[in-house]
Amino acid sequence: MAIDPPLFPGLPVVGSLLDLRNDRAELLRRAVLLHPDVVRFQVGPMRITLVAAPELIGHVLVKHAKRYTKRTRLHQMLRDGLGDGLLTAEGESWARQRRLAQPVFRADAVGVFADEITRDAEALAEQFAAATTVDATAALHRLTMRISGRVLLGAAFEADADRLYAAFDEAVRCTTARILSPLTLPLRFPTPRNLRLQRAVGTLDVFLRDVIRERRARPVVADDLLGRLLVAHDGADSFGEQELVDQLKTVFIAGFESTATMLQWLLWELGQHPELQERVREEARSTRDPEALVVTRRVVNEALRRHPAGWAGVRTCEEDDEVGGYRIPGNSMVFVSPYATHHLPGHWPDPLKFDPDRFLPEPSAQRHRHAFLPFLDGPRACAGDNLAMLELVLITAAIVARVRFTSGPDVLMPAPVVTLRPSAPVRLQIVH
Ligand code: HEM
């Protein structure tokens, strides 16, 4: 007989609502210190179950993935901003998009962009080297946006970069405010916030329509995501125009936002740990081969553990289920949180310490496969993990090879909404 998972104590009536609104990732981390397998939160009338134990996560993400869907309020808000692309779609529409996109993201397909990524990162490093203080947040977003544009859309858009970044930033702000607001009017209501969101999304849509029109004007080559979608579009498996725009918008944004967030955490940690920075620098000055950058890769993995940009997978459990002997009612919310699981003391001793040696071959081999899951797992795992890892390793190495820096602020907390952003802009003080 399944029993209810232990309840994490909250206030009467509102339950954990206030904590969830203010300090979501930390709430999950504190809860799994008490209940490391499965824990339940009551948020007003809503019940949320967090499945944290690595041994149980496969049930939700892999074995019974069909039972755990993205039919959630969060995904509706994301759909309002992004349209119905790969990240938010369900069922047959999702499966078709994933089939089409998959080959673009294979390791060998993204590997051909390694030199370009390094060149772009080196150009940014030169700018850093000429400065005394830099605002890494904006600079890294622009860099990953440019790379996403090139890899996914085959488009160089230097001239549009500022305008697009402003529209993207506005769309994120509005979507964040809508997610956090207890009462959100549907997008069709012309509230000031909805209008701002529509305007920002309109800017991105117009840009993407132009990119599509330009590509159609020349012979289509299916060598990037846009090329593949256009070939499919013109063949039997056809997409409507808005569907095409939505898919590009989703992957374009999913592609640069999480990577930029991770790079901020990475540079901040390296700025706080000068001895580690020296080790990365020594390696980065000796090779540009991403496979040989093993110290850098361990630092990247530790940043993905400690500050996973994709901090929670949110699902609706569609039918009554049982996980690890605990009852999960149908139509209730279920979280799998890389942030919570990556801080389980039973799997990660001294979990708040930044220690890349956790990723040496021996401790890695001894760990459960789902103790480390920055890209989640199963059919809805991150489609862009190969590209993300390539970017993180190459960009970190290119910057550290060229500039020595310290970072601020000294205390940086996670501010999780869609991604686990740092609570303040990351500043680098360049050491000359
Ligand atoms: C370090 C950077 C990244 C991290 C930590 C990350 C993490 C994640 C996570 C955790 C998910 C699952 C979300 C969920 O199920 O709720 C996801 C999904 C996704 N990611 Fe990433 N991601 C990163 C970079 C990228 C890049 C570079 C791309 C593409 C260029 C990308 C494209 C996608 C797509 C399309 C999905 C949805 C897949 C589906 O549902 O079929 N991501 N990502």
Image (spheres, helix red, strand yellow):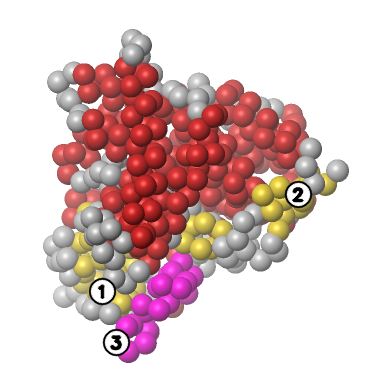
Q: Is residue 409 visible?
A: yes
> Mark number for residue 133?
2
Crowding at mark 3 (Cα within 10 Å: few <14, some 14-19, many 20+): few
How far from the left and from the top, in percent, is residue 277? 73, 46
Whether residue 17 appears in magenta in the rendering, the answer is yes
Q: Quadrant of residue 401?
A: top right
> Mark number for residue 13?
3
What quarter of the picture does the N terminus occupy? Answer: bottom left
Kind of residue indicated by mark 1: Arg
How far from the left and from the top, in percent, is residue 8? 37, 80
Which residue was labeled with disc 1? 47
Q: Is residue 94 above or below residue 176?
A: above
Kind of residue indicated by mark 2: Thr
**Residue positioned most to the top:** 219
Q: Is residue 16 above or below residue 146?
A: below
Kindly state the secondary structure of the residue where label 2 is placed: strand
Q: Which residues are magenta?
A: 9-30
Q: 368 or 69, which lies in front?
A: 69
Kindly state the secondary structure of the residue where label 3 is placed: loop
Mark with earlier residue (3, 2): 3
How far from the left and from the top, in percent, is residue 178? 35, 62
Q: Is residue 368 visible?
A: no
Inter-mark Cα distance, 1 to 2: 46 Å
Kind of residue indicated by mark 3: Val
